[in-house]
Amino acid sequence: MSMTPNRSALYMPGSNARALEKAKTLAADVVILDLEDAVAPEQKATARKLVTEAVAAGGFGTRQVVIRVNALDSPWGLDDMAAAAAVKPNAILLPKPNTGADIQRATDALGRAKADASVKLWAMIETPLSILNIADIAGTARHAGSRLQCFVLGTNDLVKETRTELDAQRTAALYWLSAAVTAARAHGLVVLDGVYNAFKDLDGLKRECLQGRSLGFDGKTLIHPDQIAVANEVFAPAAEEAMWARKIIAAFDEPGNLGKGVITLEGRMVELLHREMARRTVAIADAIAARG
């Protein structure tokens, strides 16, 4: 089992050349080079050029490189999609898909752009319709030729559109968060939590990361480099967790336990499902360790 860490996904404004260069030095697992929200309309074309040149030049190391394009029905979306596809990022992040048909439309656009098969599609979940249609959107991952790989929660947009107010426990958002995680898991997708806006409040960020991990998220989207270390810590298996996982795997591999569905380990009942969970934990821990 191989895993790619997605603990921290940092948005970087595509119109800022210095930020794009800095992205190559940060400890984020993912850098999202943004052509959408972080870029003013008059800078869209410039940002597209800066981002595609930066990706083409390389130098991002083991970081996943994702380009967030503008919505396909915007004046820039289709041009963004074609330009992004040409430089082969790890993925292209699609804003505001409301239905599975929107995912298919983006997939078709990548096909017309002759995007390499390695270029995946990530989807922002950020509208009330996307929550209501979350199963339909996630289900496109099962379609032939699908590129859909990841959901990214756009909690700020959801708050705006639903007119909710979030408390420290994000009570009003729990339905959206759990719905997205459930749909993602049902169809084998990665799923990343929304941003924490108070970037200087690292204690608050840690609290929200811990909540996100408990809800099943793979990582956290971020708006400031200072947030990376917290997300990386919370969404990585703790040393004790990884050690216990290795013990479970080793115990099931013992000759006397081969073929058993349930064993006893250090006074605990352990089932095969725990071995599968342990394998995932070890794979993530090993992938993180390999990054150095």
Image: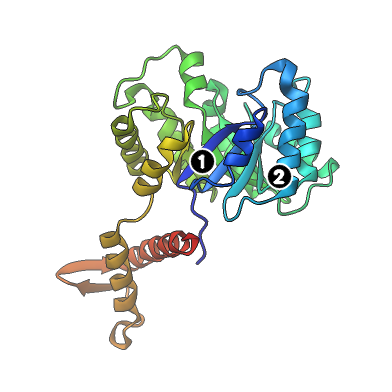
Q: Amino acid under label 1?
A: Ala
State the residue position of label 2. Answer: 55
Q: Amino acid under label 2?
A: Val
Image coordinates of residue 88 in percent, x first then y, are 74, 48
Q: Which of 185 and 49 is in front in this view?
A: 49
Residue 68 to residue 265: above or below: above
Neighbor class of circle 2 (other Cα within 10 Å; few <14, some 14-19, many 20+) is many
- Residue 104, quarter of picture: top right
- Residue 33, quarter of picture: top right
Image coordinates of residue 177 in percent, x first then y, are 42, 33
- Helix or strand or loop: what does disc 1 sit on? strand
Q: Do the residues labelled 2 and 1 touch (CB within 8 Å)?
A: no
Residue 141 to residue 34: above or below: below
Answer yes or no: is residue 103 visible. yes
Image coordinates of residue 137 in percent, x first then y, are 60, 36
Horizontal placement of 254 versus 3: left or right? left
Q: How far apart in space, not on screen, are marks 2 and 1 (Cα)?
A: 16 Å
Horizontal placement of 220 versus 88: left or right? left
Residue 278 to residue 264: above or below: above
Neighbor class of circle 1 (other Cα within 10 Å; few <14, some 14-19, many 20+) is many
State the residue position of label 1. Answer: 9
Answer yes or no: is residue 216 visible. no
- Helix or strand or loop: what does disc 2 sit on? helix
User: Residue drawn 44% across and 29% down?
Assistant: 176
